[in-house]
Every structure is written in structure tokens, then in C-alpha cells.
Image (cartoon, helix red, strand yellow):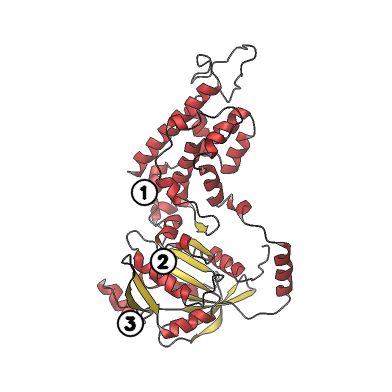
Amino acid sequence: MAGTMQQVNESVVIRSLRRFRDRYFPNTGKVKDDLTPVEDTGGERQPGFLDILPVDVQFLIMTFLSPADICCLGATSRYWRAMVRDPLLWKYFLLRDMPYWPSIDHVSMPQLELLDAPLINEDESLDDREEGDDKGVESKCDYMSEYLKGCPSCRQQWLPSRPAYEVVTSFLQSLVLSSEPRYAMFGPGMEQLDVSLVTRLMHAPDVLPVSGTPHRQINGIGSGISYMFNNQHKFNILTLYSTNRAERERARAQQQSISNKLFTTEGTDESGCPIYSPAPQVQQVCQVVDGFIYVANAEPGRGEGESEVAQIRAVLSSAGGLASRPLLVLSCVSREDPEEVTATSLQTVSSRIRARCRTPCVYMAKRLGLPQLANPWMVQDTVAESLSGLLDGISWLLKCSGVKLHGS
């Protein structure tokens, strides 16, 4: 189904690009989908060699270019500047590449409602735009900006620059020895996956060495463990389990749901969504930690929908209304899919989609209602068995807590 949808999108994009080229070079008899040179006709626009390539070939070339290379291609001529700004082209790139972005955050999250809108009519695409005029694109959805904002290889330039006073404050804070940041970790991914993320953390000295002996900190719910990031930054994780180990193992073996001791149900709101209240000991933890780590189950068909959203908001609300405390979502699966590990760059888009056995991080953010939060947040793809992606998420979390990391 996904492959069919991509083919339809490709045909629409190619048709839009072809119509624009025919409009840009009005003598359609001279610019055809072949490599026939064009004779000089005086004052009319003369296409170059790359311009007279078949539109299908031009589109194929662009699909192999990076976003930066496509922008460079647009700087070569007025024709290509208009060509690479086709909104259908960038909507196609969004639909193709977005499921494979390994992370997304509150700054780079694209507007998914733009993708739910119907495709722009061909009559409203590039045909109404003259040479060097961008009004035909700016009046519609700016898919190009949404792509460049969210693409991992491009998003750095979209990060807001820090004011000078914040730089000075950060320098002064670095001179003061501060206690190690503490984070509360919770979520269904800690208990539902076949591979325990917490257990792997405690036995992975090559990834995050344990710098502190685990000790009980919460009444029968979790434990505090100190880790060392990059061999120089200590931080503490308080694990909040909804049940004890015996109950979790029994429920996993019997494929049964268990009661959650972290929250109590307070009813439902006007829309029918559940309302949760954290247990008293959990509320105490939320008020003293520097941020939160939510372990989401990204394996297909394992989302809990509205209850997840309500529980995340209940925890953040218990933090005393401090919207500055960051939320890191580890979008976790048990292990790498064998087909995905052996995937090559020559695979087709449809085969890549079939090999992607996880919920994409962008859709995970939407599922958890993260764009509506006031807190800074990030979703990071993570694998429990290999811990891949974990360090990137921890790095972001420490930066949000004011930790000055080397090279950042």
C-alpha cells in the first residue's frame, strides 16, 4: 500500500515539473524528453544540457541528492531555482524521508497537518509562478521549509541562537560546581519489551558506565542509579516502575495487563480522555528531578493512546508547573530488525518501508501529544538490546539541564 502511494506521488511530482518546464521554455517542440540540442532562437530562453534532460531523469537525479545539494542545484540558474521549490517535490520528500528520521524535537517538529491536506492542484502549483517569483509557493504550504527544519542533516541551522546574556550566564554557571542532574524514568517501554532497557543500561560500561551503586529511593517503585556520560558528566536516573519485578515478569509471561501503581484514575474529562493523578511518592520525585525520560514502546501495535498522553501530562503537572524541565522520549524497540540491519542504499522506498518495524519518531511525538506541551521535548529512536540512539538522547537532555558538554 505504501509503495503504491509513493508511485502515485512520483507521477504527480513529475507531471508538475514537466508542466513547469514547458511553461518556462515556451517552445515545447524544442525541449522534449530527449537529449536533442536546441538551436539559438534569438532572445528566447535557451536551456542548458541539464535542462534538456527528460523530466523523469531530472526528478530521479534530485531524489539521490541531499537537501543541501538540492539547494545548491537551485543556485545554478533561475530555472532550477524555481524547479527545486516545487511544493509537491518537497511534500514527496517529506513523505518519503520523515519515517526514517532518528529523532525529532520541539524545535524541528514538522506540521503534520500539512501532510493531511490534499495534494496541491497542478493548476495551483508552479504554473502560476513566473521567473524568479515565489508567490505561487509562499501562498501555499511551505513543505520545503518544513523538510529542512526537521531533516537531521539540516536542522542545526534552525536552532535558535542564544542571546549574549545567556552565553555569559552559561559561562559563569560552568565555574560553579553543581550536583549531578537527576531524571525520573518511566513508561510502558520499561516493562513491555522483551529486552529490559534498564538491565542493559546497568551492564553496558562501554556505553554508560555506572558510577554509583544502585540504592532504593522510592517506596517499592524504583531505584536511583548514577551514570557517567563521556567519562566526565555524572547524572542520576530514578526508575519508576508501575509494579514490582515479580508482577512484571508474570504479566509478561501470561500476556496480561497489570494495575499501575504510579497513577490513580480520577475519572475522565469532557472529551472522555482519562485523568490521572500520580501517587504521592511519585509527586515528590517529580518536584525534585531536573527532567524526565519516558520510555515508549515503539513496536508496531503497542501504543496505549490517550492513557499515555494523560500520564505524561500528569507527571509534568506534578513538577510544580516548571515548563523548563525537559522531557526525553526514548522511542524504544527490543532489538534491531534483521531486514533493517541488512538494508542497503540501493533499496527501493517501498522495501525500506516494509523493513521499518517501528513507529517513526515523528508519529510517536504526535501519538503522545508532545507538540501541545510547553516543556522542551525530544523523541529519540532507541534499541534496548544495543542501546543505539541512547547517547544522543542523553546528550540532548544534559544540554537542556545546563550541562556544558565538550564540543557543544
Which amino acid, by three-letter code, is at mark 1? Arg
Which amino acid, by three-letter code, is at mark 3? Ala
Instruction: Tell me residue 124's x, y (percent).
Output: 46, 32
Instruction: Tell me residue 140's x, y (percent).
Output: 49, 40
Left or right: 128, with 269 as reference point = right
Q: Are marks 1 and 3 in contact (CB under 8 Å)?
A: no
Q: Which secondary structure, mark 3? A: helix
x 34%, y 39%: residue: 4
x 34%, y 69%: residue: 269
Mark 2 surroundings within 10 Å by alpha-carbon count, few (fewer than 14), some (14 through 19), many (20 or more): many
Q: Are marks 1 and 2 in contact (CB under 8 Å)?
A: no
Instruction: Tell me residue 397's x, y (percent).
Output: 56, 68
Quadrant of image for the C terminus? bottom right
In the rendered image, which quarter is residue 383 located in?
bottom left
Residue 194 visible to an observer of this rendering? no
- Name the foreground residue: 208 vs 127: 127
Residue under pointer 2: 296
Distance between the alpha carbons at the discs numbered 1 and 3:
36 Å
Mark 1 surroundings within 10 Å by alpha-carbon count, few (fewer than 14), some (14 through 19), many (20 or more): few
Whichever of labels 1 and 2 marks the residue nearer the N terminus, that label is 2
x 49%, y 79%: residue: 286
Residue under pointer 3: 246
Which amino acid, by three-letter code, is at mark 2? Ala
Left or right: 180, with 221 as reference point = right
Left or right: 191, with 200 as reference point = left
Distance between the alpha carbons at the discs numbered 1 and 2:
21 Å
Residue 217, compared with residue 183, is above or below; it is below
Whichever of labels 2 and 3 marks the residue nearer the N terminus, that label is 3
Residue 91 visible to an observer of this rendering? yes
Residue under pointer 1: 354
